[in-house]
């Protein structure tokens, strides 16, 4: 269900029927009601990671992603920050790691993913330096992607 929900929202976003701000506001309201903690909301975390994958700037000539004038990694990152800005750190990192795993599973090259990988690496470094426990993310989600497509 989370993958289908993300795909439906992405279709509406790409068709410009739904504004990114409306999605951001809906997620923000839900997160606020939960006290910013999503550790017991795995379906929402998966939906958010899949949504970020679905609206990732279309890499090359592949048949997925968002191909829109002006839509680049920077705009995608702004959307990611707005969607995850009020989410607890661990859940936000998990969503981004899951999105990265799915993007890798879809064959996005390392150079295209380098900015996201660098952000995640720097967050993990800062987390380690602060003495917080590292987040262990299972990359198996990328393998399940083929079954969802």
Image (cartoon, rainbow, N blue to C red):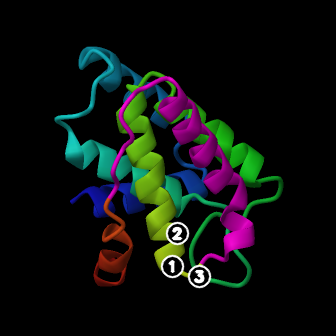
x and y percent of residue 33 in the render? 26, 16
Quarter of the image for residue 111 reads: bottom right
Give the mark toward the camera: 3 or 2: 2
Residue highlighted by disc 3: 63
Q: CA distance from mark 1 to mark 2?
A: 5 Å
Q: Residue 130 vs residue 135: left or right?
A: right
Residue highlighted by disc 2: 103
- Looking at the image, is 76 positioned above or below residue 113? above
Q: Nearer the viewer, residue 65 or 80?
A: 80
Q: CA distance from mark 3 to mark 1?
A: 11 Å
Residue drawn at point x = 31 percent, y = 62 percent:
138
Whether label 1 touches label 2, CB < 8 Å? yes
Mark 1: secondary structure: loop
Mark 2: secondary structure: helix
Which quarter of the image is occupied by the C terminus?
Answer: bottom left
Q: Nearer the viewer, residue 51 or 138?
A: 138
Q: Which residues are magenta?
A: 108-137
Residue highlighted by disc 1: 106
Q: Residue 33 vs residue 119: left or right?
A: left
x and y percent of residue 94 in the render? 38, 46
């Amino acid at each position: 269900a989370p993958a289908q929900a993300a795909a439906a929202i992405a279709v509406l976003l790409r068709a410009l029927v739904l504004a990114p701000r409306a999605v951001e506001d809906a997620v923000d309201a839900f997160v606020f009601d939960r006290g910013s903690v999503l550790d017991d909301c795995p379906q929402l975390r998966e939906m958010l990671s899949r949504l970020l994958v679905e609206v990732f700037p279309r890499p090359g000539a592949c048949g997925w992603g968002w191909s829109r004038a002006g839509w680049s990694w920077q705009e995608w990152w702004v959307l990611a920050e707005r969607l995850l800005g009020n989410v607890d750190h661990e859940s936000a990192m998990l969503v981004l790691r899951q999105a990265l795993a799915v993007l890798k599973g879809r064959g996005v090259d390392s150079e295209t993913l380098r900015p996201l990988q660098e952000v995640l690496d720097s967050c993990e470094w800062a987390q380690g330096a602060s003495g917080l426990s590292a987040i262990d993310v299972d990359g198996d989600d990328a393998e399940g992607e083929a079954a969802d497509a």
